[in-house]
Amino acid sequence: MNKPARQLRIREIIQQEHVENQHDLLRLLKEKGLKVAQATLSRDCAELGIIRSKTHAGYRLLFAEEHSGRIIKGLVGMEVVSVAGNETSVIVRTLPGRAHGVGSWLDQFHSPLILGTIAGDDTVLVIPDSVENISVLISYIHKNLSTN
């Protein structure tokens, strides 16, 4: 079987079954008549963006793009030092060098509460849609930092 067909089969298995690790995936491929070397499977998983992540039902192989928000949220939660606002804007303080990632994380929500973000080294300026929503925006950011 050629690489595109093999990777399509891997994608189908990951989407249809609860696969905890590459060993289980290798077994499932073998059951479906595909003999694949571990090194080849590992490369395929990397190319397809398959990661092993902890879920409510235990560990599972997942596509990174489907769960990147949850993964990034866990990292962002460790990078944010504080969230504060004044009469016009919200400031998110981060660990040094982490503001860009936190700003991108905020942008990916496409929240109507946020007009935009500007990131420096350790500070993200969050521009609210309205000054009347600053406290709501701060609560929204805190909520998204703490949800599982």
Image: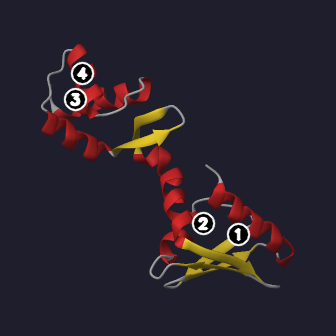
Judged from the image, the secondary structure of the residue bearing numbered disc 3 is helix
Q: Image quadrant for the N terminus?
A: top left
According to the picture, the residue beneath numbered tag 3 turns out to be: 6
N-term-proximal mark, 4 vs 3: 3
Side (left or right) of 16 relative to 91: left
Side (left or right) of 138 relative to 69: right
Q: Residue at x 42, y 29 (%)?
A: 15
Q: Residues within 10 Å of mark 1 (few under 14, many from 20)?
A: some
According to the picture, the residue beneath numbered tag 1 turns out to be: 114
Residue type, mark 4 in image:
Arg
According to the picture, the residue beneath numbered tag 4 turns out to be: 27
According to the picture, the residue beneath numbered tag 2 turns out to be: 106
Q: Residue at x 28, y 27 (%)?
A: 25
* Distance in Å between CA atoms under marks 2 and 3: 36 Å
Relative vertical location of residue 140 with respect to residue 56 in this rendering, above or below: below
* Distance in Å between CA atoms under marks 3 and 1: 43 Å
Does the residue at mark 1 contact the one at mark 2 (Cβ under 8 Å)?
yes
Relative vertical location of residue 129 with respect to residue 96 in this rendering, above or below: above
* Distance in Å between CA atoms under marks 1 and 2: 9 Å
Residue type, mark 1 in image:
Ile
Q: Residues within 10 Å of mark 4 (few under 14, many from 20)?
A: some
The answer, for residue 32, to whether it is visible in the render is no
Residue placed furthest toward the right: 132
Q: Nearer the viewer, mark 4 or mark 3?
A: 4
